[in-house]
Image (spheres, rainbow, N blue to C red):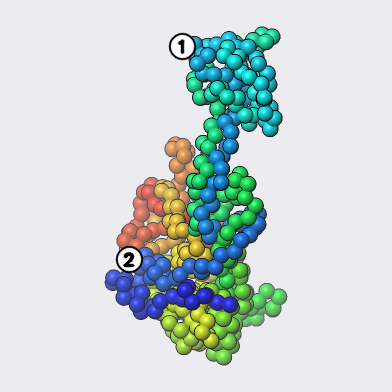
Amino acid sequence: MSASPSTLPPDLSQVVSCVSGYDPKALPVDKVQDVIRRFVRPVRVAERVDLRAALGRVLAEDVIAPMDVPAHNNSGMDGYALRSDALGTDGAATLRIAGTGLAGHEFSGDVPAGSCLRIMTGAVLPAGCDTVVPQEFCRVDGELVHVPPGVLKRGDNARMRGEDLRAGQPALLAGKLLRPADIGLIASLGQAEVMVWRRLRVAFLSSGDELRSIGQPLSEGCVYDSNRYTLWAMLQRLGCDVLDLGVVRDDPALLEAALRHACENADAVITSGGVSVGEADHLRSVMAALGDVAFWRIAMRPGRPMAFGSIASHDQRAVLFGLPGNPVAVMVTFYAFVRDALLHMMGAAAKPLLLLPVAAQTALRKRPGRTEYQRAVLTPLPDQPGRYCARTTGDQGSGILRSMSEAAGFIVLRHEQGSVQAGETVEFLPFEGLV
Ligand code: AMP
Ligand code: MG
Protein backbone atom coordinates (compact mmCIF):
# COMPACT_ATOMS: atom_id res chain seq x y z
CA MET A 1 0.00 0.00 0.00
CA SER A 2 1.29 3.40 -0.93
CA ALA A 3 0.24 6.96 -0.12
CA SER A 4 -3.55 7.38 0.04
CA PRO A 5 -5.15 9.74 -2.53
CA SER A 6 -5.23 12.77 -0.21
CA THR A 7 -1.48 12.48 0.29
CA LEU A 8 -0.69 12.57 -3.42
CA PRO A 9 1.77 15.35 -4.05
CA PRO A 10 0.88 18.03 -6.57
CA ASP A 11 2.70 18.50 -9.83
CA LEU A 12 6.35 19.39 -9.27
CA SER A 13 6.31 22.08 -11.97
CA GLN A 14 3.41 23.75 -10.14
CA VAL A 15 5.42 23.78 -6.93
CA VAL A 16 8.64 25.16 -8.43
CA SER A 17 6.69 27.91 -10.19
CA CYS A 18 5.84 29.25 -6.70
CA VAL A 19 9.52 29.46 -5.76
CA SER A 20 11.20 32.67 -6.88
CA GLY A 21 14.54 32.39 -8.66
CA TYR A 22 14.23 28.61 -9.13
CA ASP A 23 17.21 27.38 -11.11
CA PRO A 24 17.66 23.59 -11.06
CA LYS A 25 21.34 24.00 -12.00
CA ALA A 26 22.23 26.23 -9.03
CA LEU A 27 19.72 25.84 -6.23
CA PRO A 28 20.46 27.31 -2.81
CA VAL A 29 19.76 24.98 0.12
CA ASP A 30 16.83 27.05 1.42
CA LYS A 31 15.10 26.90 -1.98
CA VAL A 32 15.46 23.12 -2.03
CA GLN A 33 13.93 22.97 1.44
CA ASP A 34 11.14 25.24 0.29
CA VAL A 35 10.29 23.15 -2.81
CA ILE A 36 10.35 19.91 -0.85
CA ARG A 37 8.23 21.33 1.95
CA ARG A 38 5.59 22.53 -0.51
CA PHE A 39 5.57 19.20 -2.32
CA VAL A 40 5.25 16.58 0.41
CA ARG A 41 1.98 15.82 2.22
CA PRO A 42 1.35 14.14 5.56
CA VAL A 43 0.10 10.56 5.50
CA ARG A 44 -3.11 10.97 7.45
CA VAL A 45 -3.91 7.48 8.68
CA ALA A 46 -4.21 7.18 12.44
CA GLU A 47 -4.01 4.15 14.68
CA ARG A 48 -4.44 3.55 18.39
CA VAL A 49 -1.40 2.11 20.14
CA ASP A 50 -0.43 1.10 23.63
CA LEU A 51 1.34 3.91 25.46
CA ARG A 52 4.72 2.15 25.48
CA ALA A 53 4.51 1.58 21.73
CA ALA A 54 3.98 5.31 21.20
CA LEU A 55 7.54 6.36 21.97
CA GLY A 56 8.96 8.10 18.89
CA ARG A 57 5.57 8.14 17.15
CA VAL A 58 3.65 11.26 16.15
CA LEU A 59 0.50 12.15 18.04
CA ALA A 60 -2.57 12.17 15.76
CA GLU A 61 -4.91 14.05 18.12
CA ASP A 62 -4.62 16.42 21.05
CA VAL A 63 -4.39 14.71 24.43
CA ILE A 64 -6.80 16.50 26.75
CA ALA A 65 -6.38 16.25 30.50
CA PRO A 66 -9.54 14.52 31.83
CA MET A 67 -8.84 15.79 35.36
CA ASP A 68 -6.70 18.21 37.28
CA VAL A 69 -3.09 17.10 37.73
CA PRO A 70 -2.27 16.85 40.54
CA ALA A 71 -5.77 15.93 41.59
CA HIS A 72 -5.27 17.25 45.16
CA ASN A 73 -3.26 19.92 46.89
CA ASN A 74 -0.29 18.06 48.30
CA SER A 75 3.02 18.48 49.99
CA GLY A 76 6.24 19.02 48.07
CA MET A 77 8.42 18.18 51.10
CA ASP A 78 8.63 16.04 54.20
CA GLY A 79 7.80 18.46 57.00
CA TYR A 80 4.79 20.16 58.60
CA ALA A 81 1.72 21.48 56.81
CA LEU A 82 0.32 24.67 58.28
CA ARG A 83 -2.03 27.58 57.68
CA SER A 84 0.05 30.53 56.55
CA ASP A 85 -2.01 32.90 58.75
CA ALA A 86 -0.40 31.14 61.72
CA LEU A 87 2.96 32.64 60.76
CA GLY A 88 3.98 35.79 62.58
CA THR A 89 5.08 38.89 60.69
CA ASP A 90 8.65 37.54 60.91
CA GLY A 91 7.50 34.16 59.57
CA ALA A 92 7.96 32.34 62.88
CA ALA A 93 5.39 30.14 64.58
CA THR A 94 4.96 27.54 67.30
CA LEU A 95 2.36 24.92 66.43
CA ARG A 96 0.90 21.77 67.95
CA ILE A 97 1.16 18.56 65.86
CA ALA A 98 -2.37 17.35 65.15
CA GLY A 99 -1.38 14.09 63.44
CA THR A 100 0.48 12.63 60.49
CA GLY A 101 -0.35 12.64 56.75
CA LEU A 102 1.31 9.96 54.62
CA ALA A 103 1.40 9.82 50.84
CA GLY A 104 -1.51 7.74 49.57
CA HIS A 105 -3.24 7.74 52.97
CA GLU A 106 -5.72 10.48 53.64
CA PHE A 107 -5.56 12.18 57.04
CA SER A 108 -9.16 12.29 58.14
CA GLY A 109 -8.70 14.42 61.25
CA ASP A 110 -8.83 18.16 61.67
CA VAL A 111 -5.97 20.65 61.70
CA PRO A 112 -7.39 23.45 63.86
CA ALA A 113 -5.88 26.93 64.16
CA GLY A 114 -2.61 26.82 66.09
CA SER A 115 -1.88 23.28 64.83
CA CYS A 116 0.05 21.69 62.02
CA LEU A 117 0.20 18.27 60.42
CA ARG A 118 3.31 16.14 60.23
CA ILE A 119 3.31 15.47 56.44
CA MET A 120 5.26 13.47 53.87
CA THR A 121 6.01 14.41 50.27
CA GLY A 122 2.97 13.76 48.09
CA ALA A 123 0.50 13.49 50.99
CA VAL A 124 -2.76 15.44 50.60
CA LEU A 125 -2.74 18.86 52.27
CA PRO A 126 -5.61 19.07 54.75
CA ALA A 127 -8.25 21.74 54.19
CA GLY A 128 -7.01 25.16 55.28
CA CYS A 129 -3.31 24.27 55.08
CA ASP A 130 -1.51 26.08 52.28
CA THR A 131 2.18 25.96 53.27
CA VAL A 132 4.68 23.28 54.24
CA VAL A 133 7.74 23.90 56.35
CA PRO A 134 10.53 21.39 55.60
CA GLN A 135 11.39 19.30 58.66
CA GLU A 136 15.07 20.33 58.57
CA PHE A 137 14.07 23.94 59.32
CA CYS A 138 12.08 23.09 62.46
CA ARG A 139 12.84 22.33 66.05
CA VAL A 140 10.48 19.73 67.49
CA ASP A 141 9.80 19.69 71.19
CA GLY A 142 7.35 16.90 72.11
CA GLU A 143 4.00 17.88 70.63
CA LEU A 144 5.24 21.30 69.54
CA VAL A 145 6.99 22.41 66.36
CA HIS A 146 8.95 25.69 66.36
CA VAL A 147 9.27 27.35 62.95
CA PRO A 148 12.14 29.85 63.07
CA PRO A 149 11.70 33.32 61.56
CA GLY A 150 12.66 34.06 57.97
CA VAL A 151 12.62 30.52 56.50
CA LEU A 152 9.10 30.35 55.15
CA LYS A 153 6.56 32.30 53.22
CA ARG A 154 2.97 31.57 52.31
CA GLY A 155 2.56 28.82 49.71
CA ASP A 156 6.05 27.39 50.07
CA ASN A 157 6.38 23.67 49.26
CA ALA A 158 2.67 23.26 48.57
CA ARG A 159 1.78 21.69 45.21
CA MET A 160 -1.64 22.93 44.23
CA ARG A 161 -4.36 20.94 42.52
CA GLY A 162 -4.20 21.48 38.74
CA GLU A 163 -0.87 23.31 38.80
CA ASP A 164 0.60 20.83 36.27
CA LEU A 165 -2.54 20.47 34.11
CA ARG A 166 -6.13 21.66 34.41
CA ALA A 167 -9.03 19.39 33.44
CA GLY A 168 -10.02 20.12 29.82
CA GLN A 169 -6.66 21.64 28.96
CA PRO A 170 -4.64 20.08 26.08
CA ALA A 171 -1.70 18.31 27.67
CA LEU A 172 -0.10 17.56 24.28
CA LEU A 173 -0.96 18.75 20.80
CA ALA A 174 -1.38 16.63 17.67
CA GLY A 175 1.87 16.60 15.70
CA LYS A 176 4.05 16.05 18.74
CA LEU A 177 6.79 13.48 18.27
CA LEU A 178 6.48 11.62 21.54
CA ARG A 179 9.52 11.61 23.79
CA PRO A 180 9.96 9.99 27.22
CA ALA A 181 8.46 12.95 29.12
CA ASP A 182 5.37 12.87 26.88
CA ILE A 183 4.86 9.17 27.51
CA GLY A 184 5.01 9.88 31.26
CA LEU A 185 2.70 12.88 30.92
CA ILE A 186 0.05 10.76 29.17
CA ALA A 187 0.44 8.12 31.90
CA SER A 188 -0.09 10.83 34.53
CA LEU A 189 -3.56 11.30 33.01
CA GLY A 190 -4.34 7.63 33.47
CA GLN A 191 -4.44 7.01 29.71
CA ALA A 192 -3.25 3.57 28.52
CA GLU A 193 -3.46 4.13 24.76
CA VAL A 194 -2.92 6.97 22.38
CA MET A 195 -3.80 7.84 18.76
CA VAL A 196 -0.74 8.21 16.53
CA TRP A 197 -0.23 8.47 12.78
CA ARG A 198 0.74 5.24 11.15
CA ARG A 199 4.43 4.71 10.53
CA LEU A 200 5.81 6.07 7.30
CA ARG A 201 6.98 3.39 4.86
CA VAL A 202 10.25 4.22 3.23
CA ALA A 203 11.97 2.08 0.62
CA PHE A 204 15.63 2.56 -0.22
CA LEU A 205 18.22 1.18 -2.57
CA SER A 206 21.85 1.69 -3.50
CA SER A 207 22.96 2.05 -7.07
CA GLY A 208 26.39 1.68 -8.62
CA ASP A 209 28.09 -1.30 -10.24
CA GLU A 210 31.13 -0.85 -7.99
CA LEU A 211 29.07 -1.61 -4.87
CA ARG A 212 29.42 -4.89 -3.04
CA SER A 213 27.26 -6.12 -0.20
CA ILE A 214 28.74 -7.24 3.09
CA GLY A 215 29.75 -10.88 2.76
CA GLN A 216 30.81 -10.58 -0.88
CA PRO A 217 34.49 -10.46 -1.80
CA LEU A 218 35.76 -7.00 -2.68
CA SER A 219 37.21 -7.13 -6.16
CA GLU A 220 39.43 -4.46 -7.73
CA GLY A 221 37.80 -1.02 -7.80
CA CYS A 222 34.83 -2.03 -5.66
CA VAL A 223 33.58 -0.67 -2.32
CA TYR A 224 31.22 -2.01 0.26
CA ASP A 225 27.74 -0.51 0.20
CA SER A 226 27.84 1.58 3.37
CA ASN A 227 24.98 3.90 2.38
CA ARG A 228 22.58 1.01 2.80
CA TYR A 229 23.52 0.94 6.47
CA THR A 230 23.67 4.69 7.18
CA LEU A 231 20.31 5.15 5.44
CA TRP A 232 18.82 2.22 7.31
CA ALA A 233 20.10 3.66 10.59
CA MET A 234 18.86 7.21 9.94
CA LEU A 235 15.42 5.92 8.90
CA GLN A 236 15.29 3.65 11.92
CA ARG A 237 16.00 6.64 14.17
CA LEU A 238 13.12 8.52 12.57
CA GLY A 239 10.80 5.62 13.35
CA CYS A 240 10.02 4.67 9.75
CA ASP A 241 9.07 1.23 8.49
CA VAL A 242 11.94 0.50 6.15
CA LEU A 243 11.94 -1.56 2.99
CA ASP A 244 15.57 -2.33 2.20
CA LEU A 245 16.09 -3.14 -1.48
CA GLY A 246 19.88 -3.48 -1.22
CA VAL A 247 22.15 -2.87 -4.20
CA VAL A 248 20.44 -2.71 -7.58
CA ARG A 249 22.76 -3.26 -10.54
CA ASP A 250 23.03 -0.67 -13.24
CA ASP A 251 20.57 -2.37 -15.54
CA PRO A 252 17.47 -0.46 -16.73
CA ALA A 253 15.11 -3.40 -16.31
CA LEU A 254 16.34 -4.17 -12.79
CA LEU A 255 16.23 -0.50 -11.78
CA GLU A 256 12.74 -0.08 -13.14
CA ALA A 257 11.50 -3.21 -11.37
CA ALA A 258 13.07 -2.05 -8.09
CA LEU A 259 11.64 1.46 -8.30
CA ARG A 260 8.19 0.14 -9.21
CA HIS A 261 8.27 -2.29 -6.30
CA ALA A 262 9.42 0.55 -4.03
CA CYS A 263 6.68 2.98 -4.96
CA GLU A 264 3.99 0.31 -4.85
CA ASN A 265 4.99 -0.52 -1.29
CA ALA A 266 6.16 2.71 0.29
CA ASP A 267 5.25 6.36 0.82
CA ALA A 268 8.76 7.54 -0.01
CA VAL A 269 11.65 6.08 -1.95
CA ILE A 270 15.29 6.95 -1.37
CA THR A 271 18.10 6.02 -3.71
CA SER A 272 21.79 6.73 -3.32
CA GLY A 273 24.28 7.16 -6.16
CA GLY A 274 23.86 7.55 -9.87
CA VAL A 275 22.30 11.01 -9.99
CA SER A 276 25.30 13.17 -10.91
CA VAL A 277 25.47 14.67 -14.36
CA GLY A 278 27.61 12.55 -16.63
CA GLU A 279 26.81 9.34 -14.75
CA ALA A 280 27.28 6.38 -17.03
CA ASP A 281 24.34 4.65 -15.43
CA HIS A 282 20.64 4.37 -16.17
CA LEU A 283 19.09 5.45 -12.89
CA ARG A 284 18.32 9.00 -14.00
CA SER A 285 16.48 7.95 -17.14
CA VAL A 286 14.50 5.26 -15.32
CA MET A 287 13.48 7.79 -12.64
CA ALA A 288 12.47 10.31 -15.29
CA ALA A 289 10.42 7.68 -17.15
CA LEU A 290 8.55 6.63 -14.00
CA GLY A 291 7.52 10.02 -12.80
CA ASP A 292 7.73 13.69 -12.22
CA VAL A 293 11.36 14.13 -11.24
CA ALA A 294 13.72 17.12 -11.24
CA PHE A 295 17.50 16.69 -11.28
CA TRP A 296 19.18 19.39 -9.29
CA ARG A 297 22.62 20.77 -8.72
CA ILE A 298 22.47 22.21 -5.26
CA ALA A 299 24.75 25.02 -4.10
CA MET A 300 26.08 23.05 -1.16
CA ARG A 301 29.04 21.04 -0.05
CA PRO A 302 28.98 18.13 0.20
CA GLY A 303 25.93 16.84 -1.64
CA ARG A 304 25.61 18.70 -4.90
CA PRO A 305 23.56 16.40 -7.18
CA MET A 306 20.11 15.31 -6.11
CA ALA A 307 16.93 14.11 -7.76
CA PHE A 308 13.55 14.93 -6.29
CA GLY A 309 9.92 14.43 -7.22
CA SER A 310 7.49 11.55 -7.35
CA ILE A 311 7.39 8.26 -9.19
CA ALA A 312 4.38 6.09 -9.93
CA SER A 313 3.61 2.51 -10.78
CA HIS A 314 0.11 1.08 -11.24
CA ASP A 315 -1.48 4.23 -9.80
CA GLN A 316 0.65 4.09 -6.67
CA ARG A 317 2.80 7.14 -6.20
CA ALA A 318 5.64 7.81 -3.84
CA VAL A 319 7.87 10.75 -3.11
CA LEU A 320 11.34 10.20 -4.53
CA PHE A 321 14.67 11.38 -3.12
CA GLY A 322 17.62 10.53 -5.35
CA LEU A 323 20.58 11.24 -3.10
CA PRO A 324 24.20 11.47 -4.19
CA GLY A 325 26.36 8.40 -3.68
CA ASN A 326 29.23 9.71 -1.62
CA PRO A 327 28.86 8.38 1.94
CA VAL A 328 29.08 11.82 3.59
CA ALA A 329 26.92 13.49 0.93
CA VAL A 330 24.17 10.95 1.48
CA MET A 331 24.07 11.78 5.19
CA VAL A 332 24.30 15.54 4.70
CA THR A 333 21.48 15.60 2.15
CA PHE A 334 19.42 13.33 4.38
CA TYR A 335 19.77 15.72 7.34
CA ALA A 336 19.41 18.85 5.22
CA PHE A 337 16.35 17.77 3.21
CA VAL A 338 15.00 14.26 3.67
CA ARG A 339 14.65 14.24 7.44
CA ASP A 340 12.40 17.29 7.54
CA ALA A 341 10.32 16.03 4.60
CA LEU A 342 9.80 12.62 6.18
CA LEU A 343 8.87 14.20 9.52
CA HIS A 344 6.30 16.31 7.68
CA MET A 345 4.94 13.19 5.96
CA MET A 346 4.82 11.50 9.38
CA GLY A 347 2.51 14.29 10.56
CA ALA A 348 5.06 15.90 12.88
CA ALA A 349 4.67 19.61 13.54
CA ALA A 350 7.44 21.67 11.94
CA LYS A 351 10.33 22.28 14.28
CA PRO A 352 13.43 24.10 13.11
CA LEU A 353 16.74 22.44 13.85
CA LEU A 354 18.56 23.82 16.85
CA LEU A 355 21.66 25.63 15.60
CA LEU A 356 24.00 26.66 18.39
CA PRO A 357 26.37 29.63 18.17
CA VAL A 358 29.96 28.50 18.78
CA ALA A 359 33.37 30.02 18.15
CA ALA A 360 35.43 28.76 15.20
CA GLN A 361 38.63 27.36 16.70
CA THR A 362 40.57 27.92 13.48
CA ALA A 363 40.06 29.96 10.34
CA LEU A 364 37.75 28.25 7.80
CA ARG A 365 38.04 28.78 4.08
CA LYS A 366 34.70 29.20 2.37
CA ARG A 367 33.43 30.70 -0.85
CA PRO A 368 30.14 32.66 -0.75
CA GLY A 369 27.38 31.14 -2.89
CA ARG A 370 27.01 27.70 -1.33
CA THR A 371 26.11 26.18 2.02
CA GLU A 372 28.81 24.05 3.64
CA TYR A 373 28.39 21.35 6.24
CA GLN A 374 31.77 20.87 7.87
CA ARG A 375 32.12 17.99 10.29
CA ALA A 376 33.39 19.25 13.61
CA VAL A 377 34.04 18.52 17.27
CA LEU A 378 33.41 20.84 20.19
CA THR A 379 35.78 21.84 22.99
CA PRO A 380 34.80 23.99 25.99
CA LEU A 381 36.47 27.42 25.95
CA PRO A 382 38.67 27.49 29.06
CA ASP A 383 38.22 31.20 29.77
CA GLN A 384 34.49 31.41 28.95
CA PRO A 385 32.34 28.98 30.99
CA GLY A 386 29.39 27.60 29.05
CA ARG A 387 30.87 28.48 25.66
CA TYR A 388 32.36 26.10 23.12
CA CYS A 389 34.62 26.30 20.14
CA ALA A 390 34.40 24.02 17.12
CA ARG A 391 37.13 22.58 14.95
CA THR A 392 36.77 20.37 11.90
CA THR A 393 37.58 16.68 12.06
CA GLY A 394 40.24 17.14 9.38
CA ASP A 395 39.89 16.16 5.73
CA GLN A 396 36.40 17.12 4.58
CA GLY A 397 36.28 14.87 1.50
CA SER A 398 32.72 13.68 0.87
CA GLY A 399 33.89 10.08 0.78
CA ILE A 400 35.45 10.21 4.24
CA LEU A 401 32.75 8.71 6.43
CA ARG A 402 35.08 8.76 9.43
CA SER A 403 34.65 12.55 9.44
CA MET A 404 30.96 12.01 10.25
CA SER A 405 31.62 9.34 12.81
CA GLU A 406 34.19 11.44 14.68
CA ALA A 407 32.15 14.64 14.54
CA ALA A 408 29.80 15.93 17.23
CA GLY A 409 27.92 17.84 14.54
CA PHE A 410 28.15 20.14 11.54
CA ILE A 411 29.52 23.64 11.41
CA VAL A 412 26.94 25.06 9.01
CA LEU A 413 28.39 27.84 6.89
CA ARG A 414 25.51 29.73 5.33
CA HIS A 415 25.07 30.36 1.60
CA GLU A 416 26.18 33.98 1.57
CA GLN A 417 28.92 33.52 4.17
CA GLY A 418 32.58 33.84 3.17
CA SER A 419 35.73 32.65 4.95
CA VAL A 420 35.65 32.66 8.72
CA GLN A 421 38.37 33.97 11.05
CA ALA A 422 39.46 32.03 14.12
CA GLY A 423 37.26 33.10 17.05
CA GLU A 424 34.36 34.20 14.85
CA THR A 425 30.91 32.86 15.78
CA VAL A 426 29.56 30.11 13.52
CA GLU A 427 26.44 27.97 13.64
CA PHE A 428 26.74 24.41 14.90
CA LEU A 429 24.19 21.65 14.36
CA PRO A 430 24.73 18.95 17.02
CA PHE A 431 24.11 15.33 16.02
CA GLU A 432 23.02 14.54 19.57
CA GLY A 433 19.25 14.57 19.66
CA LEU A 434 18.97 14.66 15.86
CA VAL A 435 16.43 11.95 15.05
P1 AMP B 1 27.86 8.55 -7.50
O1 AMP B 1 26.97 9.54 -6.82
O2 AMP B 1 27.12 7.35 -7.97
O3 AMP B 1 28.66 9.21 -8.57
O4 AMP B 1 28.89 8.02 -6.41
C1 AMP B 1 29.84 8.87 -5.84
C2 AMP B 1 30.82 8.08 -5.00
O5 AMP B 1 30.12 7.48 -3.94
C3 AMP B 1 31.53 6.95 -5.73
O6 AMP B 1 32.86 6.92 -5.30
C4 AMP B 1 30.79 5.73 -5.27
O7 AMP B 1 31.60 4.59 -5.27
C5 AMP B 1 30.39 6.09 -3.87
N1 AMP B 1 29.19 5.38 -3.51
C6 AMP B 1 28.04 5.38 -4.22
N2 AMP B 1 27.11 4.62 -3.62
C7 AMP B 1 27.68 4.14 -2.49
C8 AMP B 1 27.23 3.28 -1.45
N3 AMP B 1 26.00 2.79 -1.45
N4 AMP B 1 28.08 3.00 -0.43
C9 AMP B 1 29.33 3.50 -0.44
N5 AMP B 1 29.81 4.30 -1.39
C10 AMP B 1 29.00 4.62 -2.41
MG1 MG C 1 27.69 5.92 -9.41
Residue position marked by numbered label 2 in the rendering: 369
Q: Can residue 295 be seen? A: no
298 vs 388: above or below: below
Mark 1: secondary structure: loop
Q: Where is residue 129 drawn, in percent x and y? A: 56, 22
Task: Count neighbours of disc 2 (C-alpha within 10 A) and say few if under 14, some if 14 to 19, many if 20 or more.
Answer: some
> Along the line of sight, which residue is nearer the eye, 386 or 262?
262
298 vs 255: above or below: above
> Along the line of sight, which residue is nearer the eye, 275 or 80?
80
Q: Residue at x 43, y 52 (%)?
A: 355
The quadrant in which the N terminus is found is bottom right
Task: Count neighbours of disc 1 (C-alpha within 10 A) and say few if under 14, some if 14 to 19, many if 20 or more.
Answer: few
Residue position marked by numbered label 1 in the rendering: 89
Q: Residue at x 43, y 82 (%)?
A: 292
Task: Specify whether tag 1 is near ligand 1 (CB below 8 Å).
Answer: no
144 vs 335: above or below: above
Q: Amino acid at mark 2?
A: Gly
Q: Residue furthest bottom?
A: 253
100 vs 23: above or below: above
Q: Residue at x 31, y 75 (%)?
A: 17
